[in-house]
Image: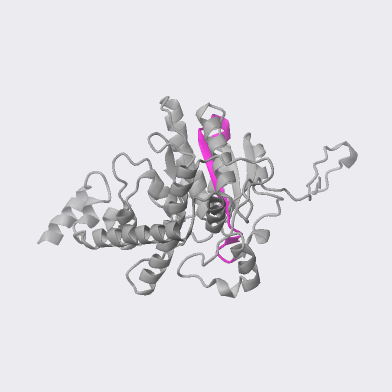
């Protein structure tokens, strides 16, 4: 420990804190080859795995469609999930959508769908339609949050409120490694630890905060090791392993539901594309690194596991692709059929009730 400022302190009497340089091995249950780690068992049965796989494949197919639509000027700035599907789907599958909540950032499409958000509603959001930001009744989900880390205090407030009202429910909130450098993250963790809020902080460490690498964001050995400083547990998991992500998130949800407080999960994954459609990753990520992570593709990992069990083959893959294509086409058609917003909506969707000034402006507009 280093002291400065001219204080006459005998450093030998000071407590010594060490920084461990030994690497931390993330939890893994499923190898990239599709084989289980020795002694591991699947936490999901084949039917659950097929549902999870379909959601992962749907997400990747929609990534391609969303990027294409943005390039055509028919979509707003879009953030693909490509490469992080196991991280998002594995964690979402650990929740009970009938009582648990998700507070997202902006790269969690399959989790939103699993929670009950219609795909056409997601499309409307990126079309700039105000109806796209409205969460349907009964869907326990907060709107997409573009402001980095701003959703984290909201997630803690929601979880604390559920606890105070004795309502059964756990809150899972997503964010990236970049957001973990924001003050909102530290403030949210501190409050969550103090009030033992039933919240799971799911940190998707995909290696980059836009073009800033993880190594330039924090000198900490892992980001999960910040958790004990706030009075709760942290865990590091292979974010490309659907099985491991599900297992650690299910355990964290169970702890939160039992009143044992928050958990910080650091999911080590990788963004196999651009940060969003305004980004050019070829300027800072080498093809060699991308190729090395492509070998750890989370979708291929599950497909290989199921193929070894005789549950996945070329015919099944073709059926999945056709079904997914139809689902996306139907959602796009439904979004296109939605009436365009009226100019009056600018006034009506700002506050629960029109302010006096808004009412006057609306009357002036109508003239």
Q: Is residue 264 left or right of 96 when viewed as pictured?
A: right
Q: Position of residue 292 (x, y in %)?
A: 64, 65
* Above-or-below relation of 78 to 44: below
Q: Position of residue 39 (x, y in %)?
A: 68, 40
Q: Residue at x 34, y 73 (%)?
A: 73
The residue closer to the viewer here, 242 or 122, is: 242
Q: How many marks?
A: 0
Q: Is residue 268 visible?
A: yes
> Which color scheme does this rendered protein use?
one colour
Which quarter of the picture shows residue 99? top left
Q: Residue at x 53, y 54 (%)?
A: 307
Which quarter of the picture shows residue 119? bottom left
Please state the extent of the stretch shown in magenta in the rendering. 192-211
* Above-or-below relation of 281 to 129: below
- Direction top: furthest residue: 166
* Quadrant in which the C terminus appears: bottom left
Q: Position of residue 295 (x, y in %)?
A: 61, 63
């Amino acid at each position: 420990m280093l002291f400065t400022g001219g204080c006459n302190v005998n450093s030998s009497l000071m407590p010594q804190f060490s920084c461990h340089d030994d690497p931390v091995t993330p939890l893994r249950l499923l190898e990239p080859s599709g084989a289980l780690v020795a002694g591991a068992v699947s936490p999901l049965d084949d039917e659950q795995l097929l549902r999870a796989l379909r959601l992962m494949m749907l997400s990747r197919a929609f990534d391609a469609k969303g990027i294409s639509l943005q390039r055509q000027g028919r979509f707003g700035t879009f953030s693909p999930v490509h490469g992080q599907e196991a991280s998002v789907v594995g964690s979402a599958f650990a929740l009970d959508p009938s009582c648990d909540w998700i507070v997202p950032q902006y790269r969690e499409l399959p989790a939103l769908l699993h929670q009950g958000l219609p795909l056409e509603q997601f499309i409307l959001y990126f079309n700039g339609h105000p109806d796209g930001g409205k969460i349907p009744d009964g869907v326990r989900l907060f709107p997409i949050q573009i402001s980095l880390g701003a959703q984290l205090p909201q997630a803690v407030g929601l979880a604390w409120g559920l606890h105070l009202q004795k309502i059964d429910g756990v809150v899972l909130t997503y964010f990236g490694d970049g957001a973990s450098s924001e003050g909102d993250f530290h403030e949210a963790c501190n409050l969550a630890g103090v009030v033992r809020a039933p919240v799971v902080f799911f940190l998707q460490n995909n290696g980059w905060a836009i073009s800033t690498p993880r190594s330039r964001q924090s000198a900490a050995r892992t980001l999960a090791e910040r958790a004990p400083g706030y009075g709760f547990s942290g865990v590091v998991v292979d974010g490309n392993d659907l099985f491991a992500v599900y297992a650690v998130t299910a355990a964290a949800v169970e702890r939160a539901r039992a009143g044992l407080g928050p958990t910080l999960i650091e999911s080590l994954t990788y963004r196999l594309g651009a940060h969003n459609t305004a980004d050019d990753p070829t300027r800072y990520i080498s093809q060699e690194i991308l190729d090395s992570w492509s070998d750890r593709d989370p979708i291929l990992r599950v497909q290989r596991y199921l193929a070894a069990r005789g549950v996945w083959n070329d015919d099944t893959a073709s059926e999945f692709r056709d079904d997914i294509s139809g689902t996306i086409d139907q959602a796009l058609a439904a979004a296109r059929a939605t009436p365009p917003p009226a100019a009056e909506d600018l006034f009506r969707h700002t506050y629960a009730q029109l302010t006096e000034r808004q009412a006057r402006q609306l009357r002036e507009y109508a003239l």
